Amino acid sequence: MSGAAYELDGVDLSVDLAGMSLPNPIMTASGCAANGPELHRFFDVAEIGAFVTKSVKATPQSGRGTPRMAETPSGMLNSIGLQGPGIDAFVSHDLPWLASVGARVLVSIAGVEAAEFAHVAQVLATCPDRSAIVGLEVNISCPNVANRGLVFACDPASSAEVLSGVRAVVPADLPLFAKLSPDVTDLVPIARAALDAGADGLTMINTILGMAIDLDRMRPHLFGVTGGLSGPAIRPVAVRAIWQVTAAMRAGTIPTAPIIGVGGVRCGADALELIAAGASGVQVGTATFHDPRAPRTVLTELAALLAERGISRLGDLVGAAHG
Amino acid sequence: MSGAAYELDGVDLSVDLAGMSLPNPIMTASGCAANGPELHRFFDVAEIGAFVTKSVKATPQSGRGTPRMAETPSGMLNSIGLQGPGIDAFVSHDLPWLASVGARVLVSIAGVEAAEFAHVAQVLATCPDRSAIVGLEVNISCPNVANRGLVFACDPASSAEVLSGVRAVVPADLPLFAKLSPDVTDLVPIARAALDAGADGLTMINTILGMAIDLDRMRPHLFGVTGGLSGPAIRPVAVRAIWQVTAAMRAGTIPTAPIIGVGGVRCGADALELIAAGASGVQVGTATFHDPRAPRTVLTELAALLAERGISRLGDLVGAAHG
Amino acid sequence: MSTGDHHPVVAVEADVLGNEPVGAYRRLTLAVPGVAATARPGQFAALTVGGETSGLLLRRSFSIHRVAAGSDPAGDRLEIVVADAGPGTHWLTQRTPGDRVGVLAPLGNGFSLPAAPGECVLIGGGYGSAPLPWLAEHLRAMGSRVHMILGAATRDRLFGAAEAGAVADSVHVVTVDGSAGAVGLVTDPLRQLLRDNNIGAVYACGPMGMLRAVGELAIEAGAVAQVAVEEAMACGVGVCMTCVLPIRGHDGATRMTRTCLDGPVFDARALRWEAAADGRVAVPDDAVGAPSAPVGRSGR
Amino acid sequence: MSTGDHHPVVAVEADVLGNEPVGAYRRLTLAVPGVAATARPGQFAALTVGGETSGLLLRRSFSIHRVAAGSDPAGDRLEIVVADAGPGTHWLTQRTPGDRVGVLAPLGNGFSLPAAPGECVLIGGGYGSAPLPWLAEHLRAMGSRVHMILGAATRDRLFGAAEAGAVADSVHVVTVDGSAGAVGLVTDPLRQLLRDNNIGAVYACGPMGMLRAVGELAIEAGAVAQVAVEEAMACGVGVCMTCVLPIRGHDGATRMTRTCLDGPVFDARALRWEAAADGRVAVPDDAVGAPSAPVGRSGR
Ligand SMILES: Cc1cc2nc3c(=O)[nH]c(=O)nc-3n(C[C@H](O)[C@H](O)[C@H](O)COP(=O)(O)OP(=O)(O)OC[C@H]3O[C@@H](n4cnc5c(N)ncnc54)[C@H](O)[C@@H]3O)c2cc1C
Ligand SMILES: Cc1cc2nc3c(=O)[nH]c(=O)nc-3n(C[C@H](O)[C@H](O)[C@H](O)COP(=O)(O)OP(=O)(O)OC[C@H]3O[C@@H](n4cnc5c(N)ncnc54)[C@H](O)[C@@H]3O)c2cc1C
Ligand SMILES: Cc1cc2nc3c(=O)[nH]c(=O)nc-3n(C[C@H](O)[C@H](O)[C@H](O)COP(=O)(O)O)c2cc1C
Ligand SMILES: Cc1cc2nc3c(=O)[nH]c(=O)nc-3n(C[C@H](O)[C@H](O)[C@H](O)COP(=O)(O)O)c2cc1C
Ligand code: FES
Ligand code: FES
């Protein structure tokens, strides 16, 4: 876990995200990379900036029935239901493997109430492989049982409640990223609430709520009825979300904090688009399903693009499109 | 303008949308078909259920500078800025042409404040070619000068203000459709506000706010910075929006009213998907740019699909996926 | 999933070497360097569809029909059998030599061969027969006696009938409409074979309903049944969790298990068939981590 | 736009008949029944890209290089010249006979021919030269004297130099790097031609900066200049309003005017060049319906 400058094609790609020093900005996206070994067959997961794990909850989760996915034009819908091993199995099984290969781990955490998030975070903050963890990504884009199953990130107060609960139980030097949902009328108040409550940075965007209908059965295609839309189809929404929140930071409307961009990135130019809009980190999600080498390829392409343009430091391009 | 049953492949495709009797459910989408003559080179615009015009405002509008569009994966961004002739030229030039070819016209109206919508509606309600107008589509997904340029449809109160203003000046037998934006945390309260204020039905969805960055200039690609995302990429969001609002109507949460579906339709199966989710009318927008014959082709394909399934009345499938 | 058993997967932009019609299907031959050493019958390949400008994001999965070793690994070939079922497979059926297609292979586990030679039945429904000739060769090479049952709705939907005679000791063809072989389902000859012979193992590949029926007959007759399932897959490599089925583990607990990584071949006894209906599979109430109550909105 | 002048447009899935290299470009020949009777030089065609599974939704526009009448209209052919500039054009450059591509043609207006024969200059930059040979033939057929200036950055980016001699009375080739013809810009020979001859009309097609410079020189010299512009187009048929430029009308008022319908050829005097900079075009303050104040959010 090196904080030193990392060069590819003569470009310094290193980034510092609220104290999270990474050799480069490229990450997997939560839920699009499982927890490591599967992708490690295709590239060394320690080579990308950080490995983001599937959102983990307090207990094992079966997830939903199938079908869990539907392909859509340049995208897909998913309704997995946060299937996972639960935090205890995660720290005893998954995290040690990631630590063993030298990955920098951004652990994504989830819950159905603020207390569950806090419990999961606390286990992580005190686990044996704590040193492999570079930060926590708080997936507030998941359903809040107390609020009719609406996602926490739909509402500033619920978002703040989760973040402050987590902040209270983890050390100040463990960076917290709040992962926001684009399915809101105005992102800025949600971003403000999360930052004010203790988030050190923001991850944007989670999937957009969508749906497909099976015309043979004349019923919803997904077992879970609605699902999250992801992939290149939604990249313009990710760019807009990052742009809006960055603009609010530059205008002084909300505190300045690093943004991790995610949504539809499949090549180096896509990553650069999110960076130019204001992201200092970039996650590669659904593109990994098209090609499991995608996160690594995006890194190579990004470095080449910067080299081509004579840019020697990635940091110089963060938010560059704002002028 | 016939209210009689209209058959294609032995299927009765006629629909009654809040008093708007149409031979079939297929329409152009506002802003994707200009005002008639251009498409009439490719098919008879009187053959589709209704022709939806470009949103018209009180005065001529230049629209924005260029670039006004960016292609995105399976979609596009546009930022036209409601370029148009203004309501007086519309009723003296555009509407007479549409009337002359026998089109059933759903006139889309826009404004920067409620009073502008009402003025435009009043001119239409009393114009010489009133009989060609089957209804008004109130485009509340456009910027409200009084509210920092946020679109009216972001907020129940602004939506209601526009609808009740229009309702007050047009006869009760002129159907009003409120066109909603998907860029909100919860569509149902907006739908309720529009219906309570006098809308007879809803059109869903307008474009999703997005953005692209020109990596050569390192600036926003569109002259207008952000733009509306449309095309097949957003169809899953349209299906979900129609589904959610239909579900709320079926649950009795909001009044029952017809829905016109729009978003990403490019073939008969796509139209059927929106119908199964709850739409009784379907608009074809961006697909028209791929092929100017698209609205007419969708109609043919939809009829063939129903015939294949042995469905004799389109009405039987509206909302069918709700079970 | 145990992390230890991850075998190497070849990821390549493969040259299309051949594309021939076989009944209603197309057999595609692809240049996949290094695939011959590791691939086993029952494994699958995941192919990109639509080319560089494609709006179809996800790979399509196909059973490996066979692999052929080149004079060196760079010359290895992989064959699949493609039914034109929708836009992605349609595009694949149109590929000609000179075109390129992204290929990941081999994926998943394959059929396990028995510890000792014995008598077995291989059953394929439609293109589900694709891996059977190659599997039969493996079984015969170790001394097993191989019966093969090939079924389909109609004659043109049969696959492998022509080459079956050369690789199997007995061949039984059935079609629903009687356009080839006997009128009926694959379970008809299977019932007979299980009764008249000492069948130790049954291997099957085809639609879910067929697999279930085959599995039940085999288990009833005291045979081991290995079935290759076909669940919609977004990634094919174990990272998305879309392809799961409820599988009973050695510990007796049911888990939603990735069919791309821990399948597509499963012991029929491990499958919770009753959870499946109408193309959908529910989470059994006793599955590990099953929700106590349904959730209203998608947790992603 | 007046509704009266809408000419018929052919909409067809066209067979690709040929695809040959011409310098850095490809010349595509397409079967477009009925196109020969109506198409005129300066009009364009809009092609779908990426095939049936394409994620590229919008058509790409290309000047019509020529049309050739078949023995009956069903045998008509249309030729375009394609620069490999991005994913859509790249896909087109890969098409081979047997492939099909959606074509709409002819679109837009073409160059107007002068009322009486005269002396004229045709100027093309890069693939902008594509429509010039055909235009030259029309002009010579009516008795005009044709000078042709072909410019490009480098030799391989020149188009039409080989056939220019056969269709023009004088040919002037310039490249920025001097790899073919004289070192320089198209404005160098144009200045000379305008000085030494009695040029009544200038026809130009190429990048915006070139069109502006050419237009200014021509107008200064008292000649009429018709320029074919190239704005990003979503539909090509007048329904989306994306392709506009500020154009001064006969009434003196400037309107944001669709270049796909009322262009792509305009009188250089009508264009509000000063609104364009850096690939962007602003709405002039005096344009009809210009906003009094900028709006913060997209009104769609
Ligand atoms: C392990 C495995 C082995 C397979 N082996 C073969 C084979 O040997 N030969 C063959 O022709 N087909 C095989 N299939 C099925 C094949 O993958 C589908 O027919 C194909 O994905 C359909 O794609 P499409 O674009 O043509 O159709 P569409 O229906 O448009 O596909 C839409 C989406 O649904 C998925 N999908 C649709 N049908 C299926 C299906 N039956 N199974 C899984 N996903 C589906 C697609 O992958 C895609 O994501 C196999 C599937 C799996 C999972
Ligand atoms: C009237 C007209 C005539 C043209 N004639 C020719 C010709 O004869 N030969 C030729 O090679 N090219 C011509 N072009 C340019 C050609 O249309 C573009 O190069 C092409 O659209 C680029 O598509 P792409 O997918 O390869 O590139 P991308 O850059 O990926 O395209 C992305 C989007 O931007 C648009 N776009 C990109 N570049 C241009 C451009 N220069 N002009 C307009 N839209 C653009 C595309 O249409 C697409 O929507 C013409 C354009 C117009 C408008
Ligand atoms: C199959 C799938 C599962 C996902 N699971 C999670 C998850 O567990 N937690 C989370 O925060 N985001 C999850 N996401 C959202 C992604 O991390 C990402 O925010 C989103 O897909 C947009 O990026 P993309 O277009 O690159 O995929 C999931 C996405 C997909 C497609
Ligand atoms: C270029 C363009 C212009 C549009 N102009 C309008 C408009 O003036 N009024 C309106 O209500 N919607 C407008 N829309 C939105 C469409 O009517 C439609 O709601 C949206 O594009 C989604 O449908 P689609 O995916 O079929 O295009 C416009 C869309 C596009 C692409
Ligand atoms: S298909 Fe992605 S985990 Fe199996
Ligand atoms: S390109 Fe659509 S109006 Fe010109």
Image (tube, coloured by chain):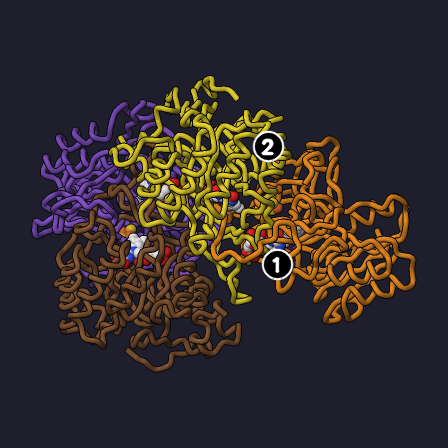
Chain colours: A brown, B yellow, C purple, D orange
- Can residue C30 be seen by looking at this rendering? no
In this picture, residue D92 sits left or right of residue D223? left
D254 vs C176: above or below: below
- Marks 2 and 1: same chain? no
- Expressed as whole percent of the image width and height from the top left, the position of residue C293 reads 14, 45
Q: Name the amino acid type tagged 2.
A: Leu
| Viewer-closest of A79 and A37 | A79
| Viewer-closest of C178 and C251 | C251
Which quadrant does the N terminus of chain A fall into? bottom left
Structural distance between the alpha carbons of marks 2 and 1: 30 Å
- Looking at the image, which residue is at 27% across and 59% down? A156
Q: Chain of mark 1?
A: D
Number of marks drawn? 2
- Looking at the image, which residue is at 79% across and 50% down? D133
Residue wearing tag 1: D282
Q: Name the amino acid type tagged 1.
A: Ala
Q: Is mark 2 within 8 Å of ligand 4?
A: no
A283 vs C89: above or below: below
Q: Secondary structure at mark 1?
A: loop
A68 vs A241: above or below: above
Q: Chain of mark 2?
A: B
Residue wearing tag 2: B95
Q: Is mark 1 within 8 Å of ligand 6?
A: no
- Looking at the image, which residue is at 36% across and 36% down? B195
Q: Residues within 10 Å of mark 1 (few under 14, many from 20)?
A: some
Q: Secondary structure at mark 2?
A: helix
